[in-house]
Structures are given as C-alpha cells and as structure tokens.
C-alpha cells in the first residue's frame, strides 16, 4: 500500500522547483495531483506529463494564487475534476529583494500578496471540503528566513514569518476536525534560480551550512511526503527546517 494511495493533493506553484519535486513525490506514492501555477507554460505542461506518466491523474491549472476570487474558482474546478481535496501544499512564492531603504510599496505588497495572502486564499477555499471529510493535511512552504530574517529580504521574511503564525493558528482551529497544518522551512535549496548564482555567492551560503552543501528539491519533497501521509498523524502546528543546520 502506497503512502498516499487514492488521495488528491493540490500543490501550488508546482511547474518547477520544489513544487514540482513534491508533485512527483506524491504521485509516486499514489496521490492524484492538481498542479497550479500563474500560467500554463511549457514547464507546467512538462510537469503535468511527467506526473501523469506515474500512473495517477494530474492536471495543471492557471491560478493567480494572490487573488481570492480566482483561487475560489480554481479550487471549485479542481473539486469538479478530482472529486475532493485531501492535501494542500501552499508552495507558490516569489522574491523581490531590496534593502528597505530602496524597497518600493509595490515590491512589499506583491511579495506579501503572492506569498502570504495566497496561503489564506487556498486554505480558505479547501477548509470546508476537509471539515466535511473530517480529515486533511495542509502544508505551508515557509523558509529559514521566516524564522531568522535576512538582509534585503524584509518583505520575503515577513511573508514567510506570517505563514508560520498562520500555520500555528490553523493547527489550533482545525485540529479538532482531524485536519493537520504544518510548515516546512527550507534553507539554501539548489533550484534553477539558485544554480545560476555566482560561485562566490553560493559559497557564502554554503559556509553558513554545517553540512557544507545546498539541499535538493527532492529532500524537501520527502519532508512534505511525511507531513502529507499518516506517518505524521500526530504532527500538528510544527515548523520543520530542511536546511542542513543552517543559521541565518
């Protein structure tokens, strides 16, 4: 019996990177997967094809996760296509880094809306589905900088710290309905974006990590799989760091 056999998962921002790795990990353990991203591009279609090839149902949806009405509509479409939602992974996120002296209101608002409001939007949209089933797992993708802060990332750090507070509140509100809510706080993870960083910048990051290397998207996905499955049936309201012991 696979860990997520017959379950349906929604993974936001899953066209590439950590979200894609989570979608694949879930599918390998039997879950049907609804993937959302801002637009259906070649990356999103390639991920959809790769997940479908694992013998489960997968469909990609264009979604502005920061928009409440759009999110509600997307979730209704997912339920119409898949029948239900058992697992939600709030992974959609962006960065717009700048020192606060130079940060614009638009940079602040955009990052807060995409990273934090999206978590409210999707959780709000799926909670009644899970409440009626009396079961569910919600996983919010925070960050080590949401725990420890980071220079030139006041907007990103605030959004990821807010996500932790939201996670802990939802764990209390929904726990009695057998719905668990936890957060993952990745550190320096090797993705397309970080792979393109200059060697010296990557070395600065790695010097902060006791394990002396960046993590992989698959290593983050394994923790998401744990939190999505019954292996973590009594884990609720927690923030799990996937950072190699990194200090921010």
Image (cartoon, rainbow, N blue to C red):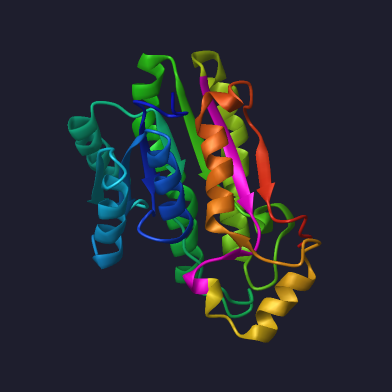
222 sits left or right of 9 in the view:
right
Asked whether 76 or 101 is in front, the reply is 76
- Residue 54 x/y as whole percent: 32, 44
173 sits left or right of 44 in the view:
right
- Residue 231 x/y as whole percent: 58, 26
Is residue 190 inside the magenta stretch?
Answer: yes
- Residue 103 x/y as whole percent: 56, 75
The stretch in magenta equals 179-193
SS assignment for the magenta stretch, majority = strand
> Can see residue 173?
yes
Figure disc tally: 0
Specify the quadrant that holds the N terminus.
top left
93 sits left or right of 15 in the view:
right
Specify the quadrant that holds the C terminus.
bottom right
Asked whether 117 or 29 is in front, the reply is 29
Q: Residue at x 54, y 23 (%)?
A: 230
Q: Where on the picture, by quarter, is residue 238?
A: top right
Q: Residue at x 22, y 40 (%)?
A: 73
Is residue 129 inside the magenta stretch?
Answer: no
Q: Residue at x 67, y 42 (%)?
A: 240
Q: Residue at x 34, y 34 (%)?
A: 125
91 sits left or right of 202 in the view:
left
Asked whether 27 or 175 is in front, the reply is 27
- Residue 130 x/y as whole percent: 39, 22
């Amino acid at each position: 019996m696979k860990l997520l056999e017959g379950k349906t998962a929604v993974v936001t921002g899953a066209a590439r990177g950590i979200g894609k790795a989570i979608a694949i990990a879930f599918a390998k353990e039997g879950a049907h997967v609804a993937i959302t991203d801002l637009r259906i591009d070649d990356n999103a279609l390639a991920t959809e094809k790769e997940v479908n090839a694992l013998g489960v149902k997968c469909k990609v949806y264009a979604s502005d996760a920061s928009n409440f009405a759009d999110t509600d509509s997307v979730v209704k479409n997912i339920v119409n296509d898949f029948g239900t939602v058992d697992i939600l992974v709030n992974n959609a996120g962006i960065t717009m880094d700048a020192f606060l002296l130079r940060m614009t209101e638009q940079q602040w608002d955009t990052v807060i809306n995409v990273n934090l409001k999206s978590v409210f939007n999707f959780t709000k949209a799926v909670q009644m589905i899970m409440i009626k089933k009396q079961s569910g797992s919600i996983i919010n993708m925070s960050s080590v900088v949401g725990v420890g802060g980071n220079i030139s990332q006041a907007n990103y750090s605030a959004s990821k710290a807010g996500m932790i507070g939201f996670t802990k509140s939802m764990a209390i509100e929904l726990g009695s309905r057998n719905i668990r809510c936890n957060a993952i706080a990745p550190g320096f993870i090797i993705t397309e974006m970080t792979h393109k960083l200059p060697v010296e910048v990557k070395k600065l990051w790695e010097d902060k990590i006791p394990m002396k290397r960046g993590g992989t998207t698959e290593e983050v996905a394994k923790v998401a799989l744990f939190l999505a499955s019954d292996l973590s049936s009594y884990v609720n309201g927690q923030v799990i760091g996937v950072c190699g012991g990194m200090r921010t």
